[in-house]
Amino acid sequence: MRQPVTRRLQAALATLAFAAAAGGIVLTAPEASAATGSATGYATQNGGTTGGAGGQTVRATTGTAIHAALCGRAAAGTPIVIEVEGTINHGNTSKVSGSSCNTADGVIELKQISNVTIVGVGGGAVFDQIGIHIRESSNIIIQNVTVKNVKKSGSPTSNGGDAIGMESGVRNVWVDHTTLEASGGESEGYDGLFDMKADTRYVTLSYSILRNSGRGGLVGSSESDVSNGFVTYHHNLYENIDSRAPLLRGGVGHMFNNHYVRINSSGINSRAGARAKVENNYFEDSKDVLGTFYTDAAGYWQADGNTLDNVTWSSPGEDNNPAGPAMESTTTVSIPYAYSPDAAGCVPDVVSRTAGAGKGLKVSDGNCTVQPPTEPTPGPTDPTPGPTDPTPPGGTNLSIGAGSDGSSKASGTSFGHLRDGDLTTYWSPAGSTGHASIKWDSATAVSSVVIREAAGSAGTIGAWRLRDADAGTVLASGDGAGTISFPRTTLRKITFEIVGSTGSPRIAEFETYSD
């Protein structure tokens, strides 16, 4: 049952007051922007990434306080900016409960939430042996923090050994000006620095340092996990990394203006059908910086404008297809966003002055000149078109007889209930956010959707996005269930993504119409 606004506000303030009393959290006034600068790369697509812009700003000095700030919001999608200062570790990071969060001990848990910024301020923010886990969440910004020595074995352990890990339907994450580091490889207990799996898309890693690790990061956990992608890596330093810089299984990756130093075994590993655009990078004192490695499942690349400085190459083999020494392209990759790459020759200098936490959030202007960050571009304030009363358009409901799928569903519910014409049955996500899709065997023209909430749950759905799942583009966005109209689009699969709610969403019918 939906709580009155007054009760929800009282509950939120009570949670925050408890955290403040225990130490580690300070309330400040709402601010217009969530982080310095604006998202770049693929994080600008699919509706963009603005994090907690426009929400309340909270200062936290412990991991428990970060969780309390998440749990103190009115809903899982209520925007919030969490400014972090000091050292976050196992001793000060505990689970906090609430209707707008799903946290855990020993990890910074961003699960089933949206519209959050975590930014280091003051003397800096260091996550010491504590990883950041993003699951079933969207519109997240992490900026100006250090995450170090996160282990999957030994003691203490956190986040499966990943500094930052994302999984299960994650959308739109911008990680910027961070330092991610380990002190060895798997035999020393560490795993990846920046991992994505299980349908994670529209991510940018910019102006960051990844160093002293056996594994830089992956996109896709296995050769069959190829639903991830649309990831941009730019102006990062990869230093003393054995492999996975990154490992890309399926999907599209765009790597430009990165400085790779001492890549010891293999660098950009494109496999299982992945396509990588690799341009204007500087590779130095490294081995096998691009290719398909350790598998016969081929990946592809477009390589332009890169500088190779003391790079060596292994011989091709059955499970080894290095791109060098010629670095010839094997595909072409079209990039949908605007960007201005620096010339490769100046990348070491630009990256040394901009990448990592505590560098003043400086950026490049695309002409090899370092400058202060630009002001953030405001996110959409009037999403169009918004929903209207759920009166169905004319014509046939195309969802009847179609297929359906989506993210994790709550116990006892079914995707089939979205298209059975029965308002007494429903699908509900496993948490407060999630997505569901209607799909057809052949291309189908659709121009409107009706989302009908189940009896007793009207008004639960908050912010949403409607996507063409084939192209990955946003058809419409807004707030609340109802009728959604958009330009007539021909597709095979359409996805309704819930990015905010005031409880447990229940969709009785996901109707689709052509006129």
Image (cartoon, grey):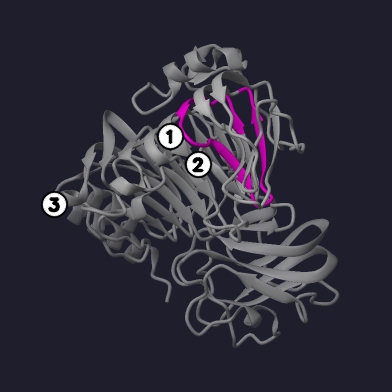
Which comes before the other along the chain, label 2 or label 3? 3
Mark 3 crowdedness (10 Å alpha carbons): few <14, some 14-19, many ≥20? few
Type of secondary structure dominating the magenta stretch: strand
Q: Residue at x 84, y 68 (%)?
A: 442
- What distance separates the C-alpha of mark 1 from that of mark 2? 8 Å
Residue with the mark numbered 2:
244
Residue 458 in view = yes
Mark 2 crowdedness (10 Å alpha carbons): few <14, some 14-19, many ≥20? many
The amino acid at mark 3 is Ala
Above or below for 487 versus 358: below
Residue bounds of the magenta highlight: 255-280
> Comparing marks 1 and 3, which lies closer to the viewer?
1
Q: Are marks 1 and 2 in contact (CB under 8 Å)?
A: yes
The amino acid at mark 2 is Arg
Q: Position of residue 509 (x, y in %)?
A: 66, 77
Secondary structure beneath dot 3 equals: helix
Any magenta on residue 424?
no
Taking 195 as reference, is 123 left or right? left
Residue with the mark numbered 1:
241
